[in-house]
Amino acid sequence: MAFVHFEDVRKVYHMGDVDVCALDGMTFDIERGELCVIVGPSGAGKTTLLNMLGGMDRPTSGVIELGGRQVSDLDDRGLTLYRRNDIGFVFQFYNLVQNLTALENVELASQICPDPLPSAEALAAVGLEGRLDNFPAQLSGGEQQRVAIARAIAKNPKLLLCDEPTGALDYRTGKQILALLQDTCRATGRTVAIVTHNSAFTQVADRVIHVREGRATSVSTNPSPAPASSVEW
Ligand SMILES: Nc1ncnc2c1ncn2[C@@H]1O[C@H](COP(=O)(O)OP(=O)(O)O)[C@@H](O)[C@H]1O
Ligand SMILES: [Mg+2]
């Protein structure tokens, strides 16, 4: 059984009289330790699938499993613990708490987890050992995203989910963040899923999932992924 298993997952949002089918029978697997890039145009259902996998919402139907455990039938309490203990999230706009320092932002997330990494260590791993006491407003966009990655990693999650993690960053900084995510996957063996509309990112992935109109239209593995530093877009 694959580490991440999505089987015929549907998600329908009800908007008044209108039903929006965001996921329309999505099926794919991701193996443990892989860097997986999920790519598709805006509106394809990428954020929706990440939210289902991250336990932020439940699918309308279908099966989602992580590490052999069924996520799609957890109750509210089960989903809360799953989000807290098993998943690290990185968002496009960082979502840091503005009146807490970098170190405090990381501590805030990791202190509710059963098996966290030391916060200062997580920040050192993303190259911010000298910026522990800075507030988000004192950091560049790329540095703030590094704090967000440290915050996610410090939870010691089974799975790191990143939704357009370079979407708010300039080209060079975006490339550095992609390299950091690739290094994190390689160095720790952690499974990392990155959602993007940028098809250049597929070059660095072990596994590439193309999504379109709520379905996985192709799933392929890449025997020799490129280092992020060498990828151009
Ligand atoms: N909470 C929601 N309520 C209603 N419709 C939604 C909601 N979230 C997403 N959608 C719709 O589902 C489709 C897929 O959206 P999304 O998963 O955000 O795509 P992507 O991240 O690939 O751009 C879109 O048509 C979007 O408008
Ligand atoms: Mg999205």
Image (spheres, rainbow, N blue to C red):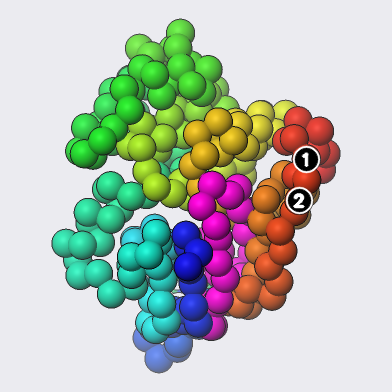
Q: Relative to 151, is 20 on the left or the right? A: right
Residue tagged by mark 1? 226
Residue at the spot x=76%, y=30% of the render? 229
* Residue located farthest toward the bottom when viewing the structure as drawn: 17
Element on which disc 2 rests: loop
Q: x, y (%) of residue 225?
A: 75, 44
Residue 46 falls within the magenta-colored stretch: yes
The dot on residue 223 is 2
Q: Give the mark toward the camera: 1 or 2.
A: 2
Of residues 102 and 49, which is closer to you in this image?
A: 49
Tell me the quadrant of the picture where the C terminus can be found.
top right
Q: x, y (%) of residue 106?
A: 33, 28
Q: Which region is colored magenta?
A: 23-49
Q: x, y (%) of residue 147?
A: 44, 27
Q: Amino acid at mark 1?
A: Ala
Residue at the spot x=60%, y=48% of the render? 35
Q: Amino acid at mark 2?
A: Pro
Residue at the spot x=61%, y=53% of the render? 36
* Residue located farthest toward the front when viewing the structure as drawn: 1
